[in-house]
Image: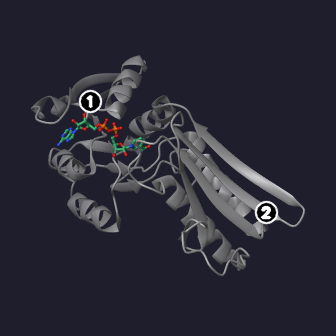
Amino acid sequence: MIKVGVIGCKGRMGVEVCRAVEAAPDLDLVAAVDAGDDYAPLQAADVIVEFTVPRATMANVQWCIENGLDVVVGTTGYDEERLATVRGWLEGRPSRVLIASNFSIGSILMMRFAELAAPYFESVEIIEFHHPDKVDAPSGTAVTTARRIAAARAAAGVAPSPDATETDPLGARGASIDGVHVHAVRQRGLFANQEVRLGNEGEQLVITENGFARSAYMPGVLAAVRGIGSLTGFTFGIEGLLGLA
Ligand SMILES: NC(=O)c1ccc[n+]([C@@H]2O[C@H](COP(=O)([O-])OP(=O)(O)OC[C@H]3O[C@@H](n4cnc5c(N)ncnc54)[C@H](O)[C@@H]3O)[C@@H](O)[C@H]2O)c1
């Protein structure tokens, strides 16, 4: 039985994580805290799951490391500087930290498929579709997908996607991330969807991932909770645990 503690238990993701842990026969939810709560009950856990807000997550991770706990982090906002700080905190400490910007298995596979396909097509663009309450654009997943596509194409020596656009004063061609165009749609009724559209003369390949609910992230979160004990120190992403690294 793995004992699990949740930080951010009153949030949309935290509620879903508590429900998933309670439903798993091999996991035991021993503590669940949110802002302002006493963190002492978390010390009974083997693994902490942290889904809070970017301004709070670093302090939570530091607390877990100082208390010798392993932590799975889903909160967004980890740039290179923050990741380096977390790696520094881990030096000489027994804790393990796994940070993943996306726990959805479909999204992880979509990114992998896109990266594999990207060198074989002349043109590639990304369209991401989300609910209108999302505050950032393009999505973190779209940015990561674009970067991985660009890296795969650069490694294979593929030329940039052809584009004769000379004027685009209103930004109709979308954001260009490492040369890959990304378009963001915000629409009521949507949750989280992404299309990677690849084109060659006479054919098109479209890789689509449709997320319908937060439950989509739970198999990945639980895989991280079950797998973190096999890791050491710092890990980014769950690709390794899924055999996709
Ligand atoms: N990695 C992924 O796959 C993935 C998927 C979905 C969402 N997210 C990210 O997860 C985070 C949480 O998303 P959400 O939709 O649940 O947000 P939310 O706003 O619904 O919940 C955040 C929770 O954190 C709590 N909180 C704030 N400060 C805290 C603190 N100092 N200590 C403890 N708890 C604190 C809030 O009270 C709230 O209950 C966001 O950063 C979001 O972008 C990641």
Within 10 Å of the Cα at label 2, are there few (<14), some (14-19), or many (20+) other Cα atoms? some
Question: Cβ of disc 1 within 8 Å of ligand 1?
Answer: yes
Q: Which of 79 and 231 is in front in this view?
A: 79
Determine which residue is flagged by label 2: 199
Instruction: Name the image quarter holding the N terminus.
Output: top left
Instruction: Name the image quarter holding the C terminus.
Output: bottom right
**Image position of 29 (left or right of 19):** left
Q: Residue 168 placed where, x, y %?
A: 59, 74
The residue that appears at 64% across and 77% down in the rendered structure is 154
User: Distance of mark 1 from mark 2, alpha carbons?
Assistant: 44 Å
**Image position of 243 (left or right of 124):** left
Mark 1 vs mark 2, foreground winner is 2
Q: Residue 144 placed where, x, y %?
A: 51, 60
Label 2: element kind:
strand
Q: Nearer the viewer, residue 166 or 14?
A: 166
Q: Residue 114 placed where, x, y %?
A: 67, 57
Residue 245 vertical placement versus 162 (above, below) = above
Picture mark count: 2
Label 1: element kind:
loop
Res 148 quadrant in image: bottom right
The residue that appears at 27% across and 32% down in the rendered structure is 6
Coloring applied to the structure = one colour
The residue that appears at 15% across and 49% down in the rendered structure is 66
Inspect the image, locate mark 1, and give the three-letter code of the amino acid beneath it: Cys
Residue 243 visible in the picture:
no
Residue 16 visible in the picture:
yes
What label sits on residue 9 in the rendered view? 1
